[in-house]
Image (cartoon, helix red, strand yellow):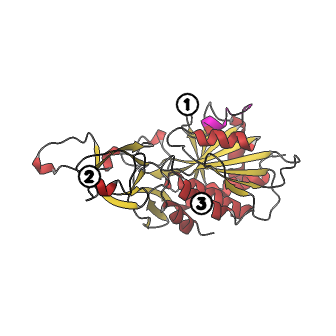
Amino acid sequence: MDIIDTLFRLCSLDGVSGDEARAAETAVDMLKNYTDDCGADRFGNVFARIGSFDGDKPTLLLDAHIDRVGLIVNYITEDGFIKASPCGGADRRVLSAQTVTVCGREKIKGVVSVFPPHAGDKKVKDIVIDTGYTKQQLEKYVSLGDRITIDSEPRELIDGTVTAPAIDDRAGVAAILYALELIKGKDTAYNIFVSFSVQEETTEAGAAIAAYASSADLALEVDVSFARTPDSKPEECGEAGKGVMIGIAPSLSRALSDRLIDLAQKGEIPYQLEVMNGRSGTNADKISVTKGGIPCCTLSIPIKYMHTPTEVVRIEDISSTARLIAEFALNGKGE
C-alpha cells in the first residue's frame, strides 16, 4: 500500500460532519482488501471485522474518524448569496476569499465573499458565498443544510511532507489501513473491529455507537494532534517527523499507554508522548465510557495547521503510527 496515494485519495473526498456517505463508500472499498465483513452501519459509520469473533480472543477496536470540518448552508438570500456557518470548527481566519464547493444535488463552485481591504475596515461577521447563480438557479441544486468544503488540492512538498485538506483525520484512516496491510495473513492477538466513525467534529456520536456495537475489550483511538510551529508552545505540541504520539491522560488507560511505549521501544518505532491533564478531546472520551467501560489509549499523528484547507503532515509519522498499531495487534497482550 502506498501511503501517499491512499492519503491523497481520502483527502480528495468531501464528507463534512454529518454528510460522510461518499467518503464512507471509498473507505469500504479500501477495507475490502482485508476482509469481506465490512460495510456501513445505520448511523453511517464504516466498520470491518477481522478475525473469527468466536470468543477465543479479546476484541480490539481501532477507530479513526472519517468526517472533516467544513461549512453548512443556512440561508439563500434574495440576490443569490449563500449564508453559511462552520460545521465542525473550520478556522474562520482563513475563509475569506477561499474557493469552495457546495455539495448539493449537484456540486457547485463558489467564493467566500470578502470586502476589499482598501475600501475600509470591515470585520468578517457572516460567511457569505458568491456562486454567480440567482436564487432561483441555486434552489434547483442547493438545499438548506447542504455541506460545503473549502477547495484545496493535496500536494507533496519535500522530504515526505505533504499538504492536503482533511488530513484530520483521513491520516488516521490511512494509518489503520496501512496497519491492516502490515498484519495481513498473520495471527493476531485480538479479533479486530475497525471503525471509521462519523460526526467526530461535531458530537463524537459515531464513535459511541461503533464502540457499543463492537463489544470491544480495549481500544486504540487514532487521530491527529498539534505539531510544533513557531507560534506554538513546545510543551503542548509534538514534533513533525518524530513519530506517533502516545497519549497519557486521566481519561485514558495508563496500562495501555505503558504497553504501547514498551512495544515502541522494543520495535524501535519512533514515538513521543502526548500528556493531557483531563479529556483527550478525541473519540477516546466517548469510547472509554461506553457499555461497562472500554480501556482506551490515543495514538496521535502530529500535523500543522489543523482545521484549515492546508494541513501538513509527514508521511513517516503516519507510518510509525501504523507500525505501532500492527505491533500491538500482533503482540499487545504481552506475556
Closer to the camera: disc 3 or disc 1?
3
**Residue 335 % position (x, y):** 85, 46
Left or right: 65 as drawn, with respect to 293: left
First along the sequence among labels 2 and 1: 2
Q: Neighbour class for label 2 at 10 Å: few (<14), some, many (≥20)?
A: some
In the image, what residue type sits under mark 1?
A: Asn
Q: What residue is disc 3 on?
A: 25
Q: Give how far apart the Cα atoms at labels 3 and 1 are.
A: 37 Å
Report the disc number at residue 80.
2
Q: Nearer the viewer, residue 144 or 72?
A: 144
Q: Nearer the viewer, residue 60 or 249?
A: 60
- The vertical placement of 296 against 95, above or below, is above
For image coordinates 50% across by 43% down, the residue present is: 201
Give the magenta part as a residue range: 285-293
In the image, what residue type sits under mark 2?
A: Gly
Closer to the camera: disc 2 or disc 3?
2
Q: Nearer the viewer, residue 18 or 192?
A: 18
Is residue 107 at least partly visible in the picture?
Answer: yes
The image quadrant that residue 51 belongs to is: bottom right
First along the sequence among labels 3 and 1: 3
**Residue 128 % position (x, y):** 28, 47
Membership of 289 in magenta stretch: yes
Left or right: 199 as drawn, with respect to 93: right
Marks counted in the figure total: 3
Q: Nearer the viewer, residue 50 or 82?
A: 82
Q: Give how far apart the Cα atoms at labels 2 and 1 are.
A: 47 Å
Closer to the camera: disc 2 or disc 1?
2
Q: What residue is disc 1 on?
A: 277
For image coordinates 81% across by 46% down, the residue present is: 334
Membership of 200 in magenta stretch: no
Element type at mark 3: helix
First along the sequence among labels 2 and 3: 3
